[in-house]
Amino acid sequence: MPAGLSTKNPALGNTLAPFYTPYPPPNRQPGGGVIFADPGPAGGFSLFYSSVQVNLMALQFDLVVIGSGPGGYVAAIRAAQLGLKVGVVERESLGGICLNWGCIPTKALLKTAQVYEYLQHAQDYGLTVQGAGFDFEAVIKRSRGVADGMSKGINFLFKKNKIETVMGTGKLLAPGKVAVTRADGTTETVEAKSIILATGARARQLPNLPIDDQKIIGYRKAMTPDSLPKSMVIVGSGAIGVEFAYFYRAMGTEVTIVEYLPRIVPVEDEEVSRQMEKSYKKLGINILTSAEVTKVDTSGAGCNVFIKTAKGEQQIACDVVLSAVGVQTNLENLGLEELGIKTEKGRILVDNFYQTNVPGIFAIGDIIPGPALAHVASAEGIICVEKITGHNPEPLNYTNIPGCTYAQPEIASVGYTEAEARAKGYDVRVGKFPFSASGKAAAAGVKDGFVKVIFDKKYGEWLGAHMIGANVTEMIAEVVVARKLETTGHEIIKSVHPHPTMSEAIMEATAAAYDEVIHL
Ligand SMILES: Cc1cc2nc3c(=O)[nH]c(=O)nc-3n(C[C@H](O)[C@H](O)[C@H](O)COP(=O)(O)OP(=O)(O)OC[C@H]3O[C@@H](n4cnc5c(N)ncnc54)[C@H](O)[C@@H]3O)c2cc1C
């Protein structure tokens, strides 16, 4: 139990545990009832009125962060490093969606799927593996264990940085004031000079796809199913949809992806979408594009999915439907309307340093405009607190944010697609290097995919890079750094890349853009 936590009232059991009561009680009492003063283990002080704890003075911090996802927890740690006394209000688990229900547990599931696929193709590597199978409960348990371990790691980092966690739901009362409602209904007031909102997002729901967590599920249930479904329709082919498609298909589920737009992974470069569709079809995933789910009939044993396509209406029977149609921000009951904090299209409006229109109140992560990605939330959190503490951070360059999809093949991209660059009026040089020509890819048995690079002909600016294949999510950082340093194509060609590696494909694709490619 960390110093300063009050657990003295046996009637309240552990529900009090996360609440810090650091101040001596003021000279006033609520009317009537029995009041017990509790000096707390570290000189803290709180009062108990009947069986309910009443903290008569607010907790005081320099900075309070509401939400402990990769935006909130990173902001909190950076602020503590910069000397602020920081409190973090969290209603569920430290680490937010990313660590508990997003980036991390999905990658644990995808690793299992990849290993299982390797075992099934062991003979391709000259190996004999008999009886490869799985215990699905153990697969899910491993993923949950990885997520729990990461969440506990945040608790460790908070203690190390002397950050207080206040468990409960936060709501703005006024600039500098937050009410925190605990699970037992009691309320605490927290005060701070600055408040950062980092409350993240949840699965978006479509009216014709109401998530019931039985037959129509969202990403949380897709990570914790009771058993492996025999068949699944996945609605939406963004990163979340295609990652689950790979996981379930690799484990043996019949998977159909339904995408409203004309191609899967629609935000990616068109050639990447085409390669992904080819690779997924090879895996046995059924893909319907320019298609819309109009209705799901769940009255029978499974689901009957009604899909409108260019060729007419189609019905697909399946065990379960996964709705993967994006996310919706958690802005309800935050006190935004009462304080007049401006929002647009469900996102809080902020300036370059994440200040809302109300001084002292900031917002970062999924709840503001921009890509809903963990690394973006973290970068915003760091810039925000550096500005709050009087430093002079550079605003975030949103055109140099990498985006990754961790299915097999992986996808990684940064900057403009070829179509976007042309639409912006650039005269472009485009180079492409397929992994079928890479020695490392051949040795590893992963020859699907390519690296595509786009440069501006006039000044040599690196406008974009789009990769699909094994390990590309590790390779994209090279492009991000090069673009940050305003590196030109020739500097990449002249930077010696190790051989044999997948990363040589970046050098070769760049050489292809300048008609200097060697291995094609
Ligand atoms: C299945 C899935 C896979 C993903 N994979 C990736 C990936 O591989 N890479 C990537 O970059 N991104 C990924 N994402 C997106 C990523 O998880 C989010 O962009 C990121 O978590 C956003 O961080 P955040 O800090 O804004 O909010 P969140 O991580 O959503 O955290 C917000 C926190 O605030 C808490 N909260 C909300 N309201 C209140 C309140 N009123 N009081 C107290 N606490 C509150 C919530 O409980 C939550 O813990 C994935 C998302 C999903 C769903």
Image (tube, rainbow, N blue to C red):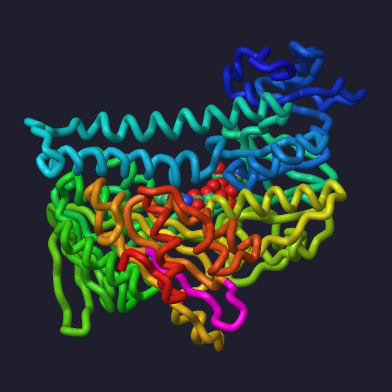
Residue 268 visible in the current orientation: no
- 58 relative to 121, above or below: above
Residue 359 image point, x, y percent? 84, 58
Placement of 403 over or under 41, stated as above or below: below
Q: Is residue 361 left or right of residue 13?
A: right
Q: Is residue 116 visible?
A: yes
**Position in image of residue 37 (x %, y %):** 79, 14
Residue displayed at 82% across by 50% down: 388
Indicate whether 38 appears above or below 284: above
Q: Is residue 474 magenta?
A: no
Residue 195: image location, x then y, percent: 76, 48
Kindly identify the residue that appears in the image at 25 percent across and 42 percent down.
113
Q: Residue at left 13%, top 41%?
A: 120
User: Which residue does the image show at 21% across and 84% down from the upper left?
Assistant: 310
Q: Is residue 497 left or right of residue 153?
A: left
Is 307 or 458 nearer to us in this picture? 458
From the image, which quarter does the N terminus lie in?
top right
**Closest to the observer: 262 or 400?**
400
Q: Position of residue 340 (x, y in %)?
A: 76, 64
Q: Residue furthest right?
A: 27
Q: Nearer the viewer, residue 74 or 201?
A: 74
Which quadrant of the figure has residue 298?
bottom left
Q: How many numbered marks does the figure carry?
A: 0
Residue 355, compared with residue 127, is above or below; it is below
Quadrant in the rendering for residue 367: bottom right
| Viewer-closest of 379 and 94 | 379
Left or right: 400, with 120 as reference point: right
Quadrant, the C terminus:
bottom left
In the image, taking residue 229 as reference, residue 357 lies left or right, namely right
Q: Which span is picked out in magenta?
A: 451-461
